[in-house]
Image (tube, grey):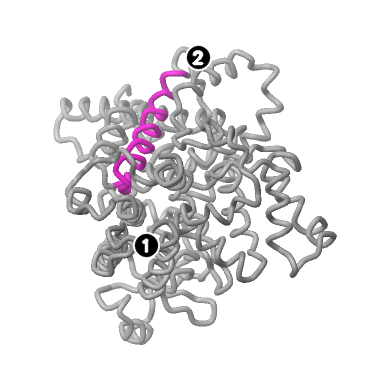
Amino acid sequence: MNNNRNDLISINQQDKYPYSINLYDAIPEFEIPIQCFEEYATRRINIYNTITKVKKENIINPINSNEVYRCVRENLPLFSNDYEIPQSLEIFKQQQIKIQENFKQRQIDHASYYILLLLCCRDVEMQEWLIKCEMSLFQLRLYNLEQKEKEEFIQSLHLKYQRATRQECQECRKYIYYTNSNEIYKVPFELVSELVRNRKIIIKKGTAFIKKNDIDIIVIDLFKKNIQKHLELVEKLVGLIQNDFDYVFSLLDTLRSKCHYQVTTHWKNSSILKENIQHTQVESLTKYFPPCMNFLFIKLKDHHHLKFAGRTQFGLFLKCGVGLNLFESLQFWEKAFQPRFNAIDFKREYAYNIRHNYGKEGSRIDYKSFDCEKIQNYNEPSNFDHYHGCPFKHFSTQNLIDYLNRYFDQYQSLSSSSLKPWNNPIQRANCIVTITNLVHQKKYCQACTYLLYFIQSNGHSMENYLNSDSTERRIYQPDNFFLYNYNHFVKS
């Protein structure tokens, strides 16, 4: 009788957490002892901090990092339910212990996710941090699932995809993207917006044709939407429960100090504010800007306008990276939009968004400038008149080469000496070749960092840079590029 009861408990536990991966659709229905609250949260924070550290120092995808993998195994390990039929009572007992351990680990993982939602939901910067770290953690777990469990998990999601017909497969294989794919599926195109945006796949009558591995992208995108939905839900609940659970929110304040989400150095903490940069100085400083911001200024000057995404990317950089205060920023944008927009039209259509970026309108959030990851992955240009994004990632090779030559030309006003690397045709050409090679390897931040070192190299060999693992001045934030460049050429 007791064995039957244990069987039922085990089955019930496995039904609640059937897979070693979770979309966290259900709010935890079990009590979390207050003495465990901080411990569970700290486990997940440790993973977030490690992911953040790896991104900052190594500029590699955390899902490929042994350090992240070890941290996950040490803090929130999730093992599969792949149990064999027990051949003896002893094996059965061992199996029951393992099932209980797995169930407990999955409860801790489940609880820690919602505690972190509660911790991060009231701060925009922490929300972004949570989303990025959760996406990395989810991808790591998804890619490390055993094939059988992964297929069962994806089937349980009831995604709208089906096998392509033999004729459709033959048509697809005429294109390079599909040549090595044994299985091709068709899905509604809106489920694979990233692949559509990158123009990798065929679309016919609203149906996108994808490779089997691309199904992972659908699952990952579904999880991202879940996180955003969960953050909104928890944020609404906070106002209802805060007065009744003061002790919980005091714990959250303690936990916040453990979070390394503010990895970006902003000019707010820099001496640049003492210099009171004015809007009339911006153009003279643009040569020291990173390519992503320099290019936006060029296009702003050409067209006297930028689309919303471009204005946001560049405007927050001017605020946090260059140190323009709100008054100077309004002056800068109003003059930049002339003569295309007069003062009345500018104030009616654009001034509100600028004040909003400075926390003076709407939700009054003090927005920070975008880091490289956000510019590269969450803010991609999608039309010919969109000039935001990362040139190293989003430009074609030829457009990048043309732009880099134009970028180097700006520095000729600093010195016409042939000893300067930008004035030496051979050194310049070698630099561009190295950068394009890094871009082809998808090492966009490393390409940007190499450009910075080259500009400041004074003709010295760049071989040491390529052979070095130093991350002391690795660029992962446009603000930092300008900081280092400005200090090198202006302050030194």
| Quadrant containing the N terminus in the rendered view | top left
| Quadrant containing the C terminus in the rendered view | top left
Q: Could you tell me the amino acid type at mark 2?
A: Ile
Residue ID at (54%, 77%): 206
Question: Does the magenta segment cover residue 84?
Answer: no
Residue ID at (25%, 64%): 427
Q: Main secondary structure of the magenta part?
A: helix
Residue nearest the observer in this picture, 348 or 258: 348
In the structure shown, which secondary structural element does the residue marked by tag 1 occupy?
loop
Relative to 218, residue 175 above or below: below
Magenta part of the chain: 38-63
Disc 2 crowd rating (10 Å Cα; few below 14, some 14-19, many 20+) is few
The residue pinned by badge 2 equals 34
The residue pinned by badge 1 equals 416
Relative to 449, residue 121 above or below: above
Residue ID at (18%, 48%): 464
Which one is in front in this view, the residue at disc 1 or the one at disc 2? 1
Can residue 203 be seen here? yes
Which circle's residue, 1 or 2, is located before the other in the chain?
2
Residue nearest the observer in this picture, 344 or 86: 344
